[in-house]
Amino acid sequence: MRSFSPRGPYDLARQSEFFGGWPTLDQSRAIVVALPLEDWHGSAAVVVRQESPEALSLDVFGATGSQADQAVAQVLATLSLDVDADAWPDVGRSDAEIGKLQTKYDFLRPVLFNSPYEAAASFIIGHRISMKQGRAIRKRLGEELGATIEVGGEVFQAFPEPDALLRLSEFPGLSTTKVERLHGVAKAALDGTLVRSYLRNLPLEEAVRAVRTIDGIGPFFAFGIVNRGAGVVDDITDDDLTKYAVQVAYALAERPSQDEVLRIAESWRPFRMWAEVLLHVWLRREVGLPRRRT
């Protein structure tokens, strides 16, 4: 078992409530994250428990040594726990609207995909089908092609490793085009493009360009992979949902331009993406999505 002390306020139960979908262990509040390791030589499952506001424990199954270290690092990044968030409450003190949301949602942090590889695969699978259908296909892929890891007598499946996706020729619910594009995602993972550490170390524009070299990945998917897969902390997306959230939260008469959003978001630095995620959570839960603009 490994112990970890979050930097900044953190509530695992609230994270699971808003972003979860993780299986739990023995009906407990511990979550189980099963995932392919980014060295692409195996998979693991990590059980995460919050022992107190200042302490979490992480138990690794299916991996030892450096691979266990890799599994822990990936899960901490997935939970945005690899970020020093001591200054996250300061954003709320600088901006009253964000401060209200931080209090309302217990300083919620973004939850990422387990890797940019899983993010890219998820976007390809989910294109032009419902979220429910996409989740079901990913679950079946894990059951049929992913690694099986036993944890305390229970069995958990990870998403297939890239080599397994490359062997895929057909799958119920996936068109031939989607299977071919998943092959491209798998190759990009194996060549190091869809690895979190690589994308995080690139300037944002370069990271997006790198991801867009994968067949089937356009601008929207590329930004999603970089922001939700690699985990950008201080960026603002240029999309209508964010503009609408800012308009409603700040009682603006009109939908703001991107320049206006960026001006307002100056007080959110260095956690602009985290503040944006809070606004999206609030919008979806309390306000409702905007009507399509004609």
Image: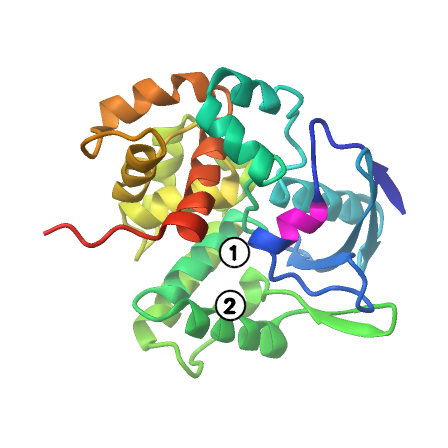
Residue 218 x/y as whole percent: 28, 50
Does residue 284 appear in the picture of this structure? yes
Identity, as a three-letter code, of the amino acid under mark 1:
Glu
Residue in the picture at 70% in, 37% down: 10
Instruction: Tell which tag, 1 or 2, sits nearer the viewer.
Output: 1
Residue pointed to by mark 2: 165
- Count the marks: how many? 2
Q: Is residue 251 above or below residue 239?
A: above
Residue 66 x/y as whole percent: 79, 44
Residue 165 x/y as whole percent: 51, 68
Which one is earlier in the sequence, the residue at label 1 or at label 2?
Answer: 1
Q: Is residue 130 above or below residue 90?
A: below
Identity, as a three-letter code, of the amino acid under mark 2:
Leu
Q: From the viewer's perspective, tell me whether residue 38 is left or right of residue 63.
A: left
Choose between 251 and 5: the one closer to the eye.
251
Residue in the picture at 69% in, 41% down: 76
